[in-house]
Image (cartoon, rainbow, N blue to C red):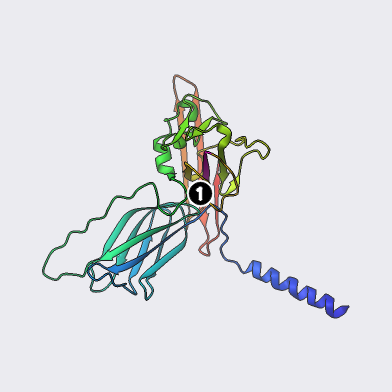
Amino acid sequence: MIRKSFRHVVTALAILVAFVGQETWALAGTTGGLTGSVVDAETSAPVANAQVTVVSPSQAASQTTDALGHFTFLTLTPDTYTVSVTKGGYQALSVPGQNVFADTRQTVSVRLIKELRTIAHVSATGADTLVKSGTTADVYSVNAASQKAVAALGGGGSLNSAYSAVASVPGAYVVPNQTGYFQTVAIRGGDYDQVGYEFDGVPANRSFDNFPSSSASSLGNAEVQVYTGANPANSEGQGLSGYINQVIKTGRYPGYATADLGIGTPAYYHRAAVEVGARHPTGSSRTTSV
């Protein structure tokens, strides 16, 4: 009996050490991925050991391509990234406007042109699109900056909510001049209870009738995702006509703080919002919005 109890204690301690040893914790619905390949523009041969760097206002990361010219960034904060590639003997190339969505992996292909010593060069890149291939539905992402720009789209009652961001997406209709929370949203002509809602991958609809029983505030949003079709495969919620996921901001190193004040007239309107976020170098982060 003593040996058996001792073995149970050792097993429990091993499990505890494994959990404590985790440096980074990721919630469902908060990060996305970016993968791709680098090839020679003339021969289409893979370019190994090329330096690939992705940069956005919220995150930066870099790595080198493998023997087949492939690169993969698995956990990126949803944002718009610029992909830069450098390799000796080739012209440096930057590909801006790569939108990374939570819970999806985007793909980008880079063709490097060999460096010319006597002839000048001009680099051109295609414009990014909101609709991404490889997904089960049209996915639209409205980041925090865009959300602020369309804040008045749904009328005065939607100034401090995410409903204006939803209203800016093709295929989504928000009844104008609604006030406050629980506003009616229709996607592709569906009823309000046919739209699924999630916060960082956590379902927010009422379970027995799929009623959207939560508010859609704009405070602390890193991204508002609107699926004008089927839910993604890893969704925990459900929606027949469409699906909305609000991704909450995470802290970044060495930290940030913002404060907004608003006063409106002739209608009485006062607003104060504060956001503070920080990330430890090991990867853990915290954001507070008031």
Q: Residue at x 55, y 32 (%)?
A: 192
Indicate the quadrant where residue 109 lies.
bottom left
Outermost residue, top side: 266
Label 1, on which residue?
A: 249
Would residue 181 be found to the left or right of residue 95 on screen? right
Residue 78 spot, x, y in % from top left: 45, 52
Would residue 209 be found to the left or right of residue 12 on screen? left
Residue 246 on the magenta span: yes
Residue 23 on the magenta span: no
Residue 37 vertical placement versus 171 (above, below): below
Q: Residue at x 45, y 29 (%)?
A: 154
Residue 110 spot, x, y in % from top left: 31, 63
* Majority secondary structure of magenta residues: strand
Q: Amino acid at mark 1?
A: Lys
| Quadrant of the rendering where the N terminus is positioned | bottom right
Outermost residue, right side: 1
Q: Residue at x 19, y 70 (%)?
A: 115
Residue 274 spot, x, y in % from top left: 51, 41
Q: Magenta span covers which residues?
A: 241-248
Q: Nearer the viewer, residue 159 or 235?
A: 235
Outermost residue, bottom side: 3
Around disc 1, counting alpha carbons within 10 Å, would you say few (fewer than 14), some (14 to 19), or many (20 or more)?
many
| Quadrant of the rendering where the C terminus is positioned | top right
Residue 188 vertical placement versus 256 (above, below): above
